[in-house]
Image: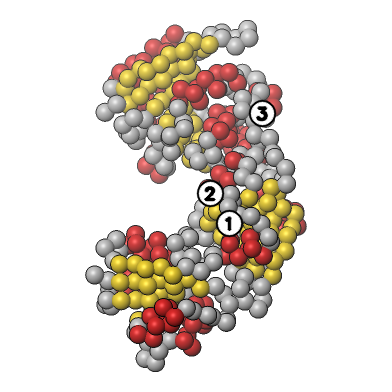
Amino acid sequence: MQKFHIIGITDSREVFFGKEIERLIARSRVFSGGKRHHEIVGGLLPEGAVWIDITVPLDDVFRRYAGYEEVVVFASGDPLFFGFANTVMRKLPEAEVKVYPAFNSLQLLAHRSLLAYHDMRAISLTGRPWKALDEALISGEALIGSLTDREKTPAAIASRMKEYGYDNYRIIVGECLGNENERVAEYSVEEAAVGSFAMPNCVILRRTSVRERPFGIPEERFELLDGRSKMITKMPVRLLSLSLLDLREKRVMWDVGFCTGSVSIEAKLQFPRLEVVSFEKREAGKRLMEINSRRFGCPGIGVVIGDFMEMPLTEYPVPDAVFIGGHGGRLEEMMEKIDTVLPAGGTIVFNSVSAESRAAFERGASACRMRLAEAVRLAVDQHNPIDTLKAIKER
């Protein structure tokens, strides 16, 4: 069985280890870490030590590890906080792992800023998409700490926040924490968006006011397709549809025929963890989604423009909930196509405006061997009644 000792360090060039770690280093022969870590601890390693750089691709690194029974790894901060210890345990579940943590960079930044961070939402954007930041912003977290990288920089983070109207935060940036070039400063979103910051760095977003997160957005607040009020799912029907989709435990929702994006936006605002992929045939839909998602502070919706019936669906995250907002007269075919990717337990919800479209949905569900779970009739103001239908795939 391989054994890994993973030692957390800061960027300080003045390294102080306890007796246990000193003895471990003195008796060990194989060491590993990033190039920056080697610069910090290289002078402390015993003569003849083997050093394995941690670089991508990681598979090459682990192939080198395979030749040794015991490896001492130096990692940044707490190796279990978005750190290398998690990678070792995932790739080598049978290995014996012991961790010696230090403060992670977000803890250091909180201490430098005298912030009580026990309720801080900690995320990492290092080599990751925007999803975790989008979720934290939509949720309105009071304190958000984020690790960064060379693309998801403090300036890029601030620019995204500005784009979606999240100027209700101050941004604290910690640069080169722990070494002689350390710098900590606080900025407005506008200031940080045009700033330049030394690497490595991290940020803490401190909320200064609560941003509105509406539930049940009136139709008139959306940018409409050519100003046509009929081309949007009415608010009561929209909320009923979301209720039948039962999104609390769902992972991915597809909105097919999104038009203004109202269903997608309401879903994402109420369930920030939900991944939403929205399809629309009309090119104008892209502009409408851009306007409306920014208007309501709703980043992270995936937009796909084109004919849904001609698309290879395997390119997109597998949905466990689908809302059909438009079908171009091919509802049954569309349901059969969705059925090819929908997992067991997946849900389809559709708003029927006529007896013909209701019958088509029922035939489509029967052809896909889906169970018609609910049908609710709702009339809004002077509009004709609408049947909101729900089918569940059981096989």
* Dots 1, 3 in contact, CB < 8 A: no
Image coords of residue 20 (percent x, y): 41, 78
Residue highlighted by disc 1: 146
Q: Alpha carbon of mark 3 to alpha carbon of mark 2: how far?
A: 26 Å
Residue in view at x 43 percent, y 10 percent: 356
In the image, what residue type sits under mark 2? Ala
Please tell me whether residue 36 is drawn above or below residue 263 in the rendered image. below
Near-viewer residue (127 or 222): 127
Residue highlighted by disc 3: 222
At label 1, counting other C-alpha atoms closer than 10 Å, the crowd grade (few under 14, some 14-19, many 20 or more) is many
At label 3, counting other C-alpha atoms closer than 10 Å, the crowd grade (few under 14, some 14-19, many 20 or more) is many
**The C terminus lies in which quarter of the figure?**
top left
Please tell me whether residue 63 is drawn above or below residue 170 in the rendered image. below
Identify the mark at residue 53; answer none if there is no mark. Answer: none
Near-viewer residue (47 or 138): 47
Residue in view at x 66 percent, y 28 percent: 222
Q: Closer to us: mark 3 or mark 2?
A: 2
**The N terminus lies in which quarter of the figure?**
bottom left
Image coords of residue 95 (percent x, y): 29, 66
Q: Alpha carbon of mark 2 to alpha carbon of mark 1: how far?
A: 9 Å
Residue highlighted by disc 2: 132
Query: Does label 2 or label 1 sit earlier along the sequence?
Result: 2
Image coords of residue 256 (percent x, y): 48, 30
Left or right of 353 in this view: 154? right
Query: Does label 3 or label 2 sit earlier along the sequence?
Result: 2
* Dots 2, 1 in contact, CB < 8 A: yes
Residue in view at x 64 percent, y 26 percent: 217
In the image, what residue type sits under mark 3? Phe
Residue 117, picture quadrant: bottom right
